Image (cartoon, grey):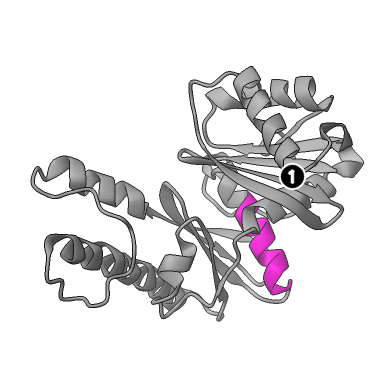
Amino acid sequence: MLLVVDIGNTNIVVGVFDGQTLHEQWRLETGRGRTEDEYGVLFLQLFKTVGLNPSKISDMILSCVVPPLVKRMIRLGERYFGVKNVMVVGRGLRSGMPIRYENPREVGADRIVNAVAAYEHVGRAHGVICADFGTATTFDVISPQGEYLGGAIAPGITVSVDALFLRASKLPRIELTRPDTVVGRNTVASMQAGIVFGYIGLVDGIVRRMLDELDYVPRVLATGGLAELISQESETIQEVVPELTLTGLRLLWERNQGSR
């Protein structure tokens, strides 16, 4: 079995693949101060709750945008799962995707992982735009030839909510749900309307501008924790793929077996 771990600034997503089948997945809060032993105990407990034997894990691949956690997760894989060579996205791994960024090293590991999975998902004859709703919302563009062209990065919706709460003394912290109307009749409903519908406008606006710049018609995918909320009202998102990042990690692991 393959253990895949995607470490973001807010959440860590963990998955276990049996072949090409995603057997289990979990979403955890990113704890920058946790040691590999604390994470190890947590991972083992998650395995226990679903009856998975940790000894069944033969390989592990890791994607991380929080550098201090990379070595801890490598040691976790070695100590708690017996994986001798933990793959880390970005460390000379072949993605099979040409990167057309001015400086390819600037592209975050999570964006490459998503791009690989998105292109594979839509079929190799189609281009794709992938929106990932995380701490930041990223928009990544892949050509019909499978080239990573670049994209856009915007503050994530939860970052926007937190900033509003912290900087406006009289505004409360709110739950992120779709309000019934755009015209709110109380403070909470007004904030929800502004944030949710305003963010949908941001997403559709960026995607439409991207479409105007492209000479082909790509499919538009979304992933990430808040993808379902935004996609319900979005006029440009065509499909939500919750397991996109985990699938991308599996694909990268498969593509690098010959080089091990």
Q: Is residue 41 left or right of residue 187?
A: right
- Going 87% across and 31% down the picture, which residue do you hit? 55
Q: Residues within 10 Å of mark 1 (few under 14, many from 20)?
A: few
Q: Quadrant of residue 120?
A: bottom right
- Going 18% across and 60% down the picture, which residue do you hit? 188
Magenta span dominant secondary structure = helix
In the picture, which quadrant includes the N terminus? top right
Mark 1 residue type: Val
**What segment is highlighted magenta in the picture?**
113-124
Q: Position of residue 168 (x, y in %)?
A: 11, 45
Q: Position of residue 253 (x, y in %)?
A: 79, 45
Q: Would you say residue 145 is visible in this rendering?
A: no
Q: Position of residue 2 (x, y in %)?
A: 81, 43
Instruction: Give the camera-side residue of 233 and 211.
Output: 233
Residue at the far left: name it: 170
- Residue under numbered circle 1: 50
Q: Is residue 229 left or right of residue 172?
A: right
Instruction: Give the camera-side residue of 176 and 221.
Output: 176
Q: Would you say residue 152 is visible in this rendering?
A: yes
